[in-house]
Image (cartoon, rainbow, N blue to C red):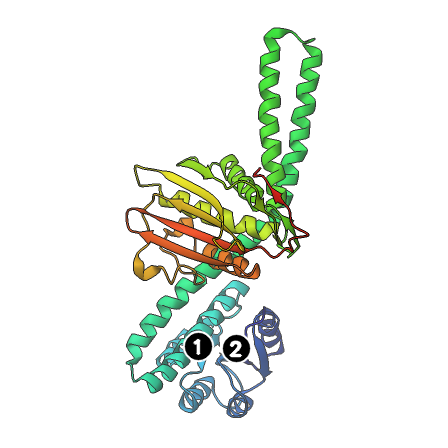
């Protein structure tokens, strides 16, 4: 996605000017001019966030152009380009407010990094100026908060992007696992034939087949889990989806740290909904619960289903005996990127997705918690099927 920031490239040489344009065009809005006069005229007519400025050009010297730019709008960031032997001039440019200097010939990563840094600084300065004028808060206080927030948000968005890529790769990885698994099956069958079913070898081949079947099951779950989350409504049995989610997490070892107790109400009605989305809801909450009990002695996960008192909704309650949630955080846990977990365990995306999926089903979530005693998440899903279309099914 292209950044909305505008970059002006000022260079009298066609080669470097076009090289910079090609490097930066996929990321930013790019404009090019050939000399200092054109550059000064452009910034007075169009909004510019950053200028890459060649110091050695005919007409107005590069240093003078820099002074004019900073005098007109000090917030515009300037990166100067200099040839070998011009280091003194580059240092002088830094004294007059240039953000950075790049030696010619330049390399692509160096240019991209410098320009991205400049754009970030420009945005921070502009935002701090607005907040300073509006709220009468010191510039230093605002910049400190903004920089911290930008860094955290970048880390969180990078994590989200990695999750997206992983989701796209998961079915392919599972497919590759399955291909190699077929080879293992085939070789094991050949081994049985070659040993002519001798009992001394049978137990080893039986173990190979048993473990291969487990791997195959996990691969199939990966292929399903990695599919794109299209919204496909159907008649669904909530308790079957709960069981499937729990079994999947058990296969991956996510619930091994706790005792899982299931208390299901018999013969709950079907609802209309998206199986995949509800599976994501249950999986996210169960994983959070299993993490919450890690450092407690009483490691329990309790999953319950029931019918609401008015008979209009199904209630799924997932409780744990973990560390609990602070009262002041109860209203924040569904905000995107809010998390109290360690960095390697999540970036606060899970519960915001959970809330969105539940609301797509016209449902809601209620949370109760006490520190050091645990937390309880109740997912309330309306029964949207007509009575004539519905039938009660026993739990799976």
Q: Does 123 appear above or below 381?
A: below
Specify few, some or many for label 1: CA neighbours under 10 Å numbering under 14, 14-19, or 20 or more: some
Q: Nearer the viewer, residue 300 or 270?
A: 270
Residue 348 seen: no
Residue drawn at (55%, 73%), measured in percent from left and top?
3
Element at label 2: loop
> Image height check: is 26 above or below 175?
below
For marks 1 and 2, give the CA distance: 9 Å
Please name the residue that numbered disc 2 is placed on. 5
Kindly indicate whether the residue at mark 2 contacts the one at mark 1 (C-beta within 8 angstroms).
Answer: yes
Q: Residue at x 38, y 78 (%)?
A: 94
Quarter of the picture containing the N terminus is bottom right
In the picture shown, does residue 283 fall above or below 85? above
Q: Which of the pair 388/141 is nearer the observer?
A: 388
Give the image location of residue 92, x and y in percent: 37, 80
Q: Locate residue 21 relative to residue 369 in the image: left or right.
A: right
User: Residue 8, image x and y in percent?
Assistant: 54, 81
Label 2: how many Cα within 10 Å (few below 14, some 14–19, many 20+): some
Q: Which mark is residue 78?
A: none
**Residue 194 showing in the rendered view:** yes
Residue 17 location, quadrant: bottom right
**Which residue bears the numbered disc 1?**
123
Q: Position of residue 298 (x, y in %)?
A: 32, 37
SS at mark 1?
A: helix
Image height check: is 17 above or below 294?
A: below
For residue 279, side relative to residue 128 (left or right): right
Number of numbered discs on residues: 2
* Marked residue nearer the N-terminal end (1 or 2): 2
- The picture places residue 24, in percent across and down from the top left corner, at 57, 71
Taking depth in this image into account, of 311 and 123 the one nearest to the observer is 311
């Amino acid at each position: 996605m292209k950044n909305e920031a505008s970059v002006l490239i000022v260079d009298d040489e066609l080669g470097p000017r076009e090289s910079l344009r090609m490097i930066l065009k996929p990321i930013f809005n790019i404009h090019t001019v050939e000399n200092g006069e054109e550059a000064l005229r452009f910034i007075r007519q169009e909004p510019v966030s950053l200028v890459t400025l060649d110091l050695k050009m005919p007409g107005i010297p590069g240093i003078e152009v820099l002074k004019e730019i900073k005098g007109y709008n000090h917030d515009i960031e300037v990166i100067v380009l200099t040839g070998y032997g011009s280091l003194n001039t580059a240092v002088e440019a830094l004294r007059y407010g240039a953000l950075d200097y790049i030696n010619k010939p330049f390399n692509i990563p160096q240019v991209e990094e410098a320009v991205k840094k400049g754009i970030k600084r420009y945005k921070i300065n502009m935002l701090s100026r607005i907040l300073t004028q509006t709220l009468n808060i010191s510039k230093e206080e605002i910049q400190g908060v903004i920089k911290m927030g930008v860094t955290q948000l970048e880390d969180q968005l990078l994590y989200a992007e990695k999750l997206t890529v992983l989701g796209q790769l998961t079915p392919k990885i599972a497919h590759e696992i399955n291909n190699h698994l077929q080879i293992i099956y085939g070789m094991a069958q050949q081994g049985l034939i070659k040993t002519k079913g001798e009992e001394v070898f049978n137990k080893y081949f039986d173990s190979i087949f048993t473990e291969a079947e487990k791997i195959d099951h996990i691969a199939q779950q990966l292929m399903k889990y990695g599919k794109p989350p299209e919204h496909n409504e159907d008649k669904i049995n909530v308790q079957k989806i709960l069981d499937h989610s729990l079994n999947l997490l058990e296969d991956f070892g996510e619930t091994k740290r706790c005792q899982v107790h299931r208390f299901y109400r018999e013969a709950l009605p079907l609802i209309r909904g998206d199986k995949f989305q509800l599976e994501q809801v249950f999986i996210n909450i169960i994983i959070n619960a299993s993490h919450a009990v890690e450092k407690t002695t009483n490691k329990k996960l309790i999953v319950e289903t029931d019918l609401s008192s008015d008979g209009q909704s199904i209630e799924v309650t997932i409780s744990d005996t973990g560390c609990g949630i602070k009262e002041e955080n109860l209203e924040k846990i569904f905000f995107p990127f809010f998390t109290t977990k360690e960095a390697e365990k999540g970036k606060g995306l899970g519960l915001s997705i959970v809330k969105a999926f539940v609301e797509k089903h016209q449902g809601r979530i209620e949370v109760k918690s006490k520190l050091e005693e645990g937390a309880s998440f109740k997912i309330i899903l309306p029964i949207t099927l007509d009575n004539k279309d519905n039938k009660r099914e026993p739990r799976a």
